Image: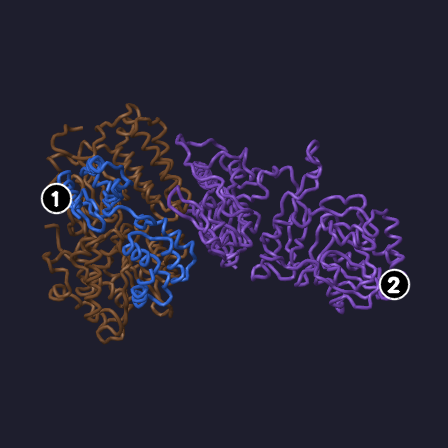
Amino acid sequence: MTGRKILMDFEVTPTSHTLEAYAARGGYQALAKVLREMKPAEVTKEVTAAGIQGRGGASFPAGRKWQVVDPDDGQPHYLLANADEGEPGTFKDRWLLEHVPHKLLESMLIASYALCVRNCFVYIRGEFDLPYRRLAAAVEEAYAAGYFGENILGTGFSCDIYVFRGGGAYVCGEASSLLSSVEGTRGYPRNRPPRLTVKGLYQRPTVVNNVETLSNLAWILKHGAGEYRKVGTEKSPGTRLISISGHVNRPGVYEVECGYPWKKFLDEDCGGILNGRKLKAIIPGGISSQVLPGEVAYGLELSHEALWDVNSSLGSGGMIAIAEGTCMVRLLQVMLRFYHHESCGQCTPCREGMGWAHRVIDRIVAGKGRPEDIDTLIHISKFNDGTTICGLGDAAGYATVDFIKHFRDEFEYFIEHKRSKCDGRLECLPEVAHA
Amino acid sequence: MKHLIPEFEAIKKRLPAEGHSTLVLPCLHRIQEDRGYIADEDVDALVEYLGVPRIQIEEVLTFYTMLRRRPIGRWHLQVCRNVSCSMRGAERLIDHLSRKLGVAPGQTTPDGRITLSTVECLGSCGTAPVVMVNERYHELQDEQSLDKLLGELEQP
Amino acid sequence: MPEIFINGKPYQADPDQTVLQVCLANGIYVPYFCWHPHLSVVGNCRICMIEEEGRGVDIGCNMPVKAGMRVLTESEEVHAHRKAILQFITLNHPVDCGICDKAGECTLQDYHYEYNGAPSMSHEPKVTSTKFYDLSDRIVLDNERCILCSRCVRFTREVSKSNGLGIEERADVSLVRPSTDGSFKDDAYSDNVVDICPVGALLSRSFFYKSRVWYLTSTPSVCPGCERGCSIDIWHRKPEWFVQSLDPSENSAIARVTPRENPAVNGPWICNKGRDLARIFERKRALEPMLKGKPATPADALATARELLAAARHPVAVVSSWGSNEELDAFRRAFDAGLTVVAKHDHAPEPGEVVEDDVLIRADKNPNSARVRELFGNAAASIPAEADLVLVWGEGQAFSKIPPGAKVILLGSYLAPENGHADVFLPISIQTERDGHYTNFQGTVSGFSACFPKAPGVADAESLFAALAGSAP
């Protein structure tokens, strides 16, 4: 219904995640083809030609990231799949790990071959329960079948994988912080330069890719970049997994072909807004993407370029639908509390700024807001934009600025009247009157 | 911790030779799984086994929310209070559990059986509100299902 | 050699320099907290922002030079960022200046006046934290003042290698904390973190609340604690701030000792023993000449000493490895080959003291053994049995090793039982009361200057030698 399928192209059953089921669907054929018929540089070329953009949040083209790694520099390289999935609103990598972990593993083998990686990792957030168990079991199945280890499929290519569990830190979803964590230290992000593809894990060339980004590779290498390009739009080839939650009737994970109309997605595929309400606002791709008013979203298609045009982003694909009557001030409060809790504390603007912004909005919600508070929040956001070591500060800033930009009247109301314009409501319940 | 060393040695087989400090977090997870928390003597033993500076372990222990140096209740109830869960009633459920258990988030019941915590996004937004009980996710919770869950926990 | 343009002017750079380094090398000041020339780059304070024309601002300490790049260090955007970063840093920083030892030499104070100067925008109560936290018995930490630049942590990782410090917790409740294995307490270089802390978060217990820094002046000197001879600054009261109604000994007291940067010897560091030089220099002084323990006039004591020297048939002199180059030269000139010279180590390692390491500390706990070797290379190691007169210069000579029956002339500075057993005791000045030079174990010569006046009855050893030998000085 939501366009062509690359990832969710099978029926989920109690055993569809097993190696047997995956192989029966044609799994590991792409790997065999790559190992037997292609050179590493050719694989990278194909991935670049496919134009697949990162699906972790930054939408950076994967091929461009890979090209920095020189296969012949004689030193170890590392590949890490980012399964830290901590961006609020996002739960689509989880779907892949629970239902088709072998697609990730096959894709990681293909990527490891292309990047001359001997040791690869999956960094999975520590809280994940079933996804971890399914992934770990899949790894053992793959080893048993000879897809990991020495001399895979007799081609001379060897590769080991380790599934590394995080310890509970959103910041570790940031690539350099993830590497600090894997190195056994605090998850402190690192300054660039050097880029991680030059000096990453243990100061070696390292590629960190999102689970979904990687999972697409098996299909891309099986069918070719040209076929991949036929799916989606010119600037956003392929599909995106959208995990939608909030005030919709059918939350969940959907695979959407890029270019698919947003209104159709919400009204038809997701069953519309709860209790027949209007859509007040929508967060497109994780809370670190800029919120859009409902009417704006209805006019757009789901593609990277359409959202960039309105200064927003598909980000991590974590979509949150917000119904009319929801207090946007309280919603921002929940978000700033989150960013404050998750700041690693390394750099000045974020460490001090997140706590400051959180305290300001707590004060507003407690009915003690001051007129200058809105300017203060914008000031904090402005000086967390492009001034920090990683994007956490920027993300909190974008969220704050756009919440205020589109819903300033609610903030002003709360400050002036010392209470919410929407009765502090976060839920969308049937018996509540419209705001 | 010593009895876990064979497991740790097995992990090394899948790590690069230059990557043995990678073991810090996996070892701490396993130690906590085994003992329920990470004791001072575990830190001593881990420093000796890994050969990393003690301060590195101590920094790591305070950085990650999942690691603890003190025991907690037999059952750890962690309620997500982030955006999508709040939009589906998490705040109500936190109040409900708080009243039912007689503790505030962050505290353990006087009989030591249940610890209540609020946590940030667990990656289960589509099935909000979600509550973690020890390692398991319990999704689509409401007051009734939580009461049932609590009832099941009471049984020894 | 790439050429870059800073504020419109061209400058030569090394290819592996950062823009911050090029700026500082050319006298273009850019503020920084976390960067330090001897520590790794972390780029966490974010105040060294520099604008690259057409590309916006970024931190200068991690900005590699590129041929032809054009940067601005005083643009509007740079100024706005500096001000904003200072807003963030002072957000929770306690206004402790009135009671903080760092006042007057605090980078945050200086930058606030220079780059911000505005009141805080915040209406929130400041985040409070631990104050007076004992990192060790030498260093006290105030977490509220700490700006988490991590210089102290990096120091213990990269320079002293004790791994004694780390950062615990997260966000704005992050805390510098010591390792619980006591490695910071055992770090012989721990006090350097007080110097490199840009604010008053890390303070020395021995200097705690002793004095405002603007009452003090520093005199360049050389640490006598071992043969490395680290360059130091000895801090003491400025004459215009001498106390009038308190104990006047305050005016000639060592307030503190800090390193004086010397790339050839010690870089910017010294060990903790160097910080504690007051323990050595401020021991009780011997100020009166004595003849067999009875007070005598300088003239009588000198005359007796000269008689003894003239009458001796096997005179021996035990020279001091704490004598300056000038004193040792004067000694040789005065006595030439007239007596047998024995060398000694005035000080030996104390129990518990670090003997030697691969950072700065050397096993020979004397500042000028090298010059003694240069001048008296053939010096005997012990006093010959036939000695009938021993001239002992300085500390460390066990009287039990002096042949019984030999006459003893002792030149010393500190009260000691031996002073009363010598036939003649003549008090001499100490390092802080005169100018001079030491030669370190690598042959590097370093100078020290007088900090304090001598007491009236005390002579400079240099002028005494000529008088004792009866020759012109």
Q: Which chain does tag 2 point to?
A: C
The mark lying in front, picked from 1 and 2, is 2
- The picture's colour for chain C is purple
Mark 2 lies on a secondary structure that is loop
Q: Can residue A295 be seen in this view?
A: no
Q: Mark 1 points at which residue?
A: A250
Quarter assignment of residue A16: bottom left
Check chain identity for marks 1 and 2: say if they share one: no
Residue at 84% over, 64% down: C388
Q: Which colour scheme is used?
A: by chain
Q: Mark 2 points at which residue?
A: C312
Q: Where is residue C278 in the image (x, y as percent from the top left)?
A: 65, 47
Quarter assignment of residue C385: bottom right
- The picture's colour for chain A is brown
In the rendered image, which quarter contains the C terminus of chain C?
bottom right
A187, A50: nearer the viewer:
A187
Would residue A359 appear left or right of C461 to someone viewing this image? left
Q: Which chain does tag 1 point to?
A: A
Q: What residue type is labelled 1?
A: Arg
Q: Which amino acid does label 2 sit on?
A: Ala
Quarter assignment of residue A148: bottom left
Q: Where is residue C436 in the image (x, y as percent from the top left)?
A: 74, 53
Residue at 82% over, 57% down: C409
- The picture's colour for chain B is blue
Q: Please determine whether, in this image, residue A397 is positioned above or below residue C294.
A: above
Say the numbered circle drawn on residue C82: none
A142, A241: nearer the viewer:
A142
Mark 1 lies on a secondary structure that is loop
Q: Where is residue C40 in the image (x, y as percent from the top left)?
A: 48, 55
Q: Gap between marks 1 and 2, in whole Å?
A: 111 Å
